[in-house]
Amino acid sequence: MSAARPLNTLRTFAVIAALPLLLTACGYGAESTDDGEQAEVAADAKKLSADEVKIGYFPNLTHATALVGVQEGLLQKELGGTRIKSSTFNAGPSEIEALNSGSIDIGWIGPSPAINGYTKAAGKNLRIISGSASGGVKLVVNPEKIKSLKDVKGKRIATPQLGNTQDVALLNWISEQGWKVDAESGKGDVSVVRTDNKITPDAYKSGSIDGAWVPEPTASKLVAEGGKVLLDEGDLWPDKKFVITNIIVSQSFLKEHPDVVEAVLRGSVKTNEWINANPDKAKASANKALEELSGKALPAEVLDPAWKSVTFLDDPLAATLDTEAEHAVKAGLLEQPDLKGIYDLAPLNKVLRAEGKDEVDDAGLGVK
């Protein structure tokens, strides 16, 4: 198998943060927030092979496995005396940089930065070791200006950032309609307006955009402002499932501390099980974590529909990640990557077997 071909400078930085549901004052490209918090553990709790594990995630609902797992102590319980130290991020590139530098060991992240990070490092820095969430992406429009899908032509549609997961999805959908758009500039039959999610609702209210292809909770914020959901991206995928959040680990940490990685995965699996068994409690827990991280909780009219549109699962939906990479290549934002080896699902499948759950598949993109 040949090595991944390098991206040019512009495209390298274009294919970036997935799912940047910004709930803080920070925007894209913001540095991480080192929470400096370590979970409390019992004095007599037995440590694993590492004193601590440094985890990273975004302060948004599609990372609720991490939010709830930390908030409820479900991750720490599986780690025993090995403490969790958490950091939060507002952009995928900064989380990948943190993983590469050793500032974090394990992270929750979207597909585009995982693909780009793996490609840039020629497959030597990270592995995807689990799924976490699916769904939660919608095309929301001004119903006075756009009444049907064909009306999108000629309109101004926002995406979070050039080359991010939702931007690629919109460009691919536009292409499938037979319309033309220059991916770099966003100009064409549809004007693709790259806009930070934190200001997208204001852009919508001012009329500077006619709609947006965005993740939750931004989509529900637009609906609260009078927008209409014209398309749920899940409807474009088989079984209405597509990866929106993965769990990644540095290859060196996986090699040196497999017991810690397995404990985190066990905690993630048990957290997802708890979330799905207790949706109302889990929703409240995630919102409490968001409030602590950002200083402001989501109102019910935004939180409730946003939460319902996200599915929490352990399956990384590997085939959909491969398809998302193909969409980025088709859009001209990514050179053909070699993703063989991006997955190592052996630790997850070991956990799933022990829990009496079905194993998951790497779609032929796993380590040999």
Image: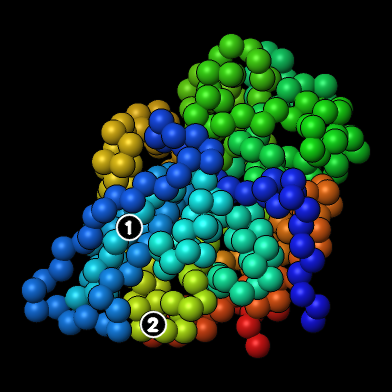
Q: On the rendered image, what quadrant is the C terminus found in?
A: bottom right
Name the residue type under label 1. Answer: Ser
Q: Which residue is mark 2?
A: 257
Residue 124, horizontal then vertical, whole percent? 61, 74
Residue in front for this viewpoint, 117 or 227: 117
Which of marks 2 and 1 precedes in the sequence? 1
Q: On the rendered image, what quadrant is the N terminus found in?
A: bottom right
Q: Residues within 10 Å of mark 2 (few under 14, many from 20)?
A: some
Whether residue 149 is visible here, answered yes or no, is no
The residue lying at 53 percent from left, 41 percent from top is: 29
Q: Which residue is mark 1?
A: 86
The residue lying at 74 percent from left, 30 percent from top is: 192
Q: Residues within 10 Å of mark 1 (few under 14, many from 20)?
A: many
Residue 87, horizontal then vertical, whole percent? 36, 54
In the image, taking residue 226 as reference, residue 281 lies left or right, namely left
Helix, strand or loop at label 2? It is loop
Residue 93, horizontal then vertical, whole percent? 56, 51
Residue ranking furthest to the bottom? 368
The residue lying at 63 percent from left, 83 percent from top is: 367
The residue lying at 28 percent from left, 71 percent from top is: 52
In this rendering, is residue 260 above or below 41? below
Helix, strand or loop at label 1? It is strand
Residue in front for this viewpoint, 191 or 95: 95
In this rendering, is residue 307 above or below 107? above
Residue 69, horizontal then vertical, whole percent? 31, 60
